[in-house]
Image (tube, helix red, strand yellow):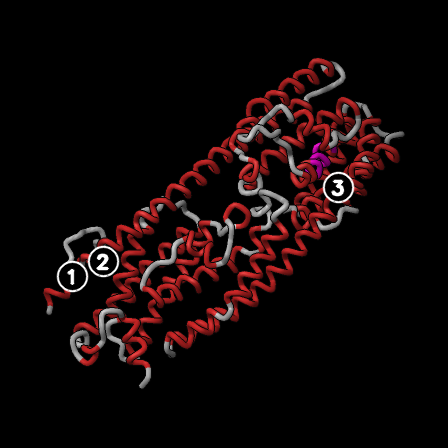
Amino acid sequence: MEEQLFGTSLRITTGNNNNNNNSGTVSKRESVYCQQFQQYAHQLDAVNEKRERIVKASRDVTTSSKKVIFQIHRINRANRGAALQQAERDLHAVQSIHVRRVAQELKANETWKYKRAFSPGMQEFVEAATTLEFCKTGKLLTLQQLNASLSHLKDVSDAPFSISTGDYLLGVADLTGELMRLAISGVAAGQREVAIAVCGFVQALYKGFSQLPNTVDIRGMPKKMDLMLQSLIKIENTCYAVHVRGLEYPEDMIVNALEHEEIDSDQEA
Amino acid sequence: MEEQFAEFRAELDETGSVYEQLRIIAANLDSFIRLMQAALMPIHHCSFPQVKEKVKGYMSDLCGLYAKLAHVIKDKPGQYYRYHDLWRNQTSTVVFVLAFLHWLDTGGLLTHTETEALLNLDPAVFGIDLEDYLIGLCSFSNELPRYVVNRVTAGDYNCPKEVSTFLGDLYTAFRTLNLRNDHLRKRFDGIKYDLKKVEEVLYDVKIRGLLNGPSLQATATGHESNVATSHQ
């Protein structure tokens, strides 16, 4: 009895051994299941490995897009032409190297399967591209224009890669944060007109966003809209400060005051 | 700028309505599956044929609901994963119920492909995500310790041996997967605790000599003994 018991529990815990008692059918069934699951393992492996490659490419899109944005913040009256050109080149590199890597992993029906893996990268890329466009022309780069510039990137089935509406909207929401920084640094550099231009632009953006229905499909939209409103308020306060106090105080005092307000409100939050 | 946002409004209205259509069907699916699961639960104290008939009665409506989901999506290739969260949990529960039923019927494991066939699903259009299937199997495993305990109480002393063999094989098969540290991995870890509980019941039954005792007339498949011993 005890031997049997011992033999039985040994068989159970080391499921792979084949010297079982009345086990002809048992080990056969086990190997059928294992064969089946090996197929599943291959499928899962393929999916997981692709997802990892896409995540890595997306992270690179993010870091290189952020560099473009930093480059844009470095633009001043003196270096404007050269700095803009550099930013253009950098943005093009982001697209042709890193966004391409994402595009090349995706088959036609797989965009939504791997969406979460590359969405952050695309949002950051949209943010960089729209920030640059605003600096160049004061206009909003449309999704159509952006996707036209990407149409040379093909996915596995040779269809052009495109950025989704959701990612575009989230990226543009982030754009307002960068514009807020541009407005404040513009005032510091003595260019009050930048703040005023930014203010009108972001007000129009916010109006557009507020009218969008059904964004339940787009993850994180409510929070981004909150942040957008806060950026807009900071921009409006900047314009107010420039207008009301600008006649009396020099720029850097205004900027100091604004930055203090910013620090205070960040600490409250 | 306004033009672009007007276009977005129209686009989001459309995708919003697709989402709403799917959400409603998925909500129906959800309450339907609860009914189906409730119909299966008496297996813990009733005979299999009774329960089997009741559960099978739900199948055609279930297939209909999945067909409705498939119909909404079929013109939009690749959107399965866009809305996948709407039916992810429900599908895992369906797999659990069907796998349990299949095992009670045949003693075997329902495969991924067989599950899709049972639901009349065409994987190219609307299939069952592999992870949903695997998680459904984990839920099935979770149910087995309780089933075994109740079977033994009802006098079916062969059940623990069969279940522990089956679950052991399932666990071995699962170990061939390379899992990441995600939800599936946690559920997979649960299987070994289920196996342990079943082995404990097997041990209880064995050391009391019950295996070769009263139910000696129980034949090769425990399912017949299930039927035989439960009409008491």
10 Å crowding of disc 2: few (<14), some (14-19), many (20+): some
> Going 70% across and 18% down the picture, which residue do you hit?
A84
Q: Which chain carries label 1?
A: A
> Going 71% across and 25% down the picture, which residue do you hit?
A132
Asked whether A88 or A158 is in front, the reply is A158
Are marks 3 and 1 in one subunit?
no
Q: Which mark is residue A22?
A: 1
- Asked if residue A185 lies left or right of residue B179, the reply is right
Residue stretch in magenta? A172-179
Q: Is label 1 in a helix, a strand or a loop? A: loop
Asked whether A255 or A86 is in front, the reply is A86
Query: Mark 2 = which residue?
Result: A26
Horizontal and vertical percent position of residue B137: 40, 58
Mark 2 in CB contact with mark 1 (< 8 angstroms): yes
Does residue A240 appear anywhere in the picture?
yes
Query: Mark 3 = which residue?
Result: B8
Q: In this view, does A84 lie above or below B212?
A: above
Q: Is residue B80 above or below residue B150?
A: above
Q: Residue B41 carries which label?
A: none
Horizontal and vertical percent position of residue B43: 39, 74
